[in-house]
Image (cartoon, rainbow, N blue to C red):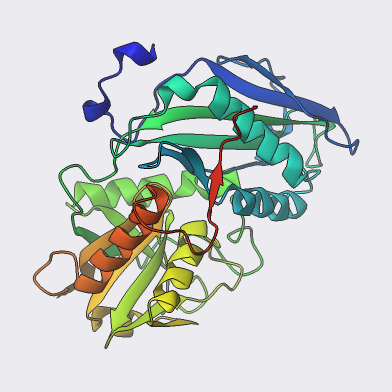
Amino acid sequence: MADDIDWDSLTFSMTPTDFMYMTTIQGDEPWKPGQIIPFGPIQMSPAAGVLNYGQGLFEGMKVFRTSKERIVFFRPEENARRMQRGADRLKIPPVPESIFIDAVEQVVSANQKFIPPVGRGAMYVRPLLMGSGPVLGVAPAPSYTFLVYVTPVGPYFKGGVQAIELLISDVHHRAAPGGSGGVKAIGNYAPGMKPSKEAKAQGFAEIIYLDAKTHTYIEEVGAANYFCIKDNVLYTPELTGTILPGITRDSTIQLARSMGYTVIETKVSVEFALAADEAFCCGTAAVISPIGSITHGDVKSVYGDGTPGSVTQLLYTELTNIQKELSEDPFSWLHELPSHV
């Protein structure tokens, strides 16, 4: 129950809520609006396409109570469009943006009491799109399910933004050219659990993946996008199909440019990254997470004194202030929850 939640003890983890949204179609028939149902297990054939062949996608976004006493989503239209691109790649009928937005609005509205108070967390929204019908043989499923659930989450950083230590992997790769690395397919994430756990066992917060072709260029940090700063210029790996086009990544680029910074999307070599002045990674969970050091083999590069750099801290503050409506939103990123839902 929401009344029993200690908002100050919330972490970024799963807390069950009351309701979820679900709709199912057969084959390539048009998507129809679904319905709100109690949160809980769903019935699915053991031969479901998503269980046997990984034909599924997910999204993640946040909803905030703001300083202006509004409930807002952060750029949900971009999540809808990214899921459509992923659906096309995995041969799933794309969910129209109108149905996607209506679904997330309905679920958040039904679970409003689980949205943390201003500044004490957010509601995390998880849309799922999957081949739910039974299929034997590698082929598109005969039916598909679009499902949305939510959970309250606490601030990613307790007690302020903290710099993390990362390890570059020369063994594991997240994605290869021509694969599905550029979409949020469920199968992209399980292979990262082993290298991530191994890095954490060595005292690192996460792994950094290099490109699978030359083993020379930085691609992603675990499940987050990478940036580094040299002489007040921001550099981030270009989107080549092996890197997820993160919505926080795009927001950071737009925000930094609006503040007068130059942002260059290019191939970022390990050598260049280790010589940078600052570095950070970004994603929905942490927003912007400063990197204190990167280790590659016997080489360890520490940025500044190992604490968040000034540009990184400024970008984090400005982006989170927009989300909380402590600053103006010149980009029209915030999507208010309609009162009639």
In this rendering, is residue 326 above or below 263? above
The extreme bottom residue here reads 231
In this rendering, is residue 255 above or below 96? below
Quarter of the image containing the C terminus?
A: top right
In this rendering, is residue 208 above or below 215? above
Quarter of the image containing the N terminus?
A: top left
In this orientation, which residue lies closer to the viewer: 37 or 191?
Answer: 37
In this orientation, which residue lies closer to the viewer: 328 or 42?
Answer: 328
Residue 24 visible from this viewpoint: yes
In this orientation, which residue lies closer to the viewer: 186 or 313?
Answer: 313
Residue 178 in the image: x percent, y percent?
66, 67
- Left or right, 4 with respect to 332, comes to left
Q: How many marks?
A: 0
Residue 99 in the image: x percent, y percent?
74, 37
Residue 258 in the image: x percent, y percent?
44, 76
**Identity of the residue drawn at 89% across and 39% down:** 28
- Left or right, 341 with respect to 163, comes to right
Residue 18 in the image: x percent, y percent?
51, 15
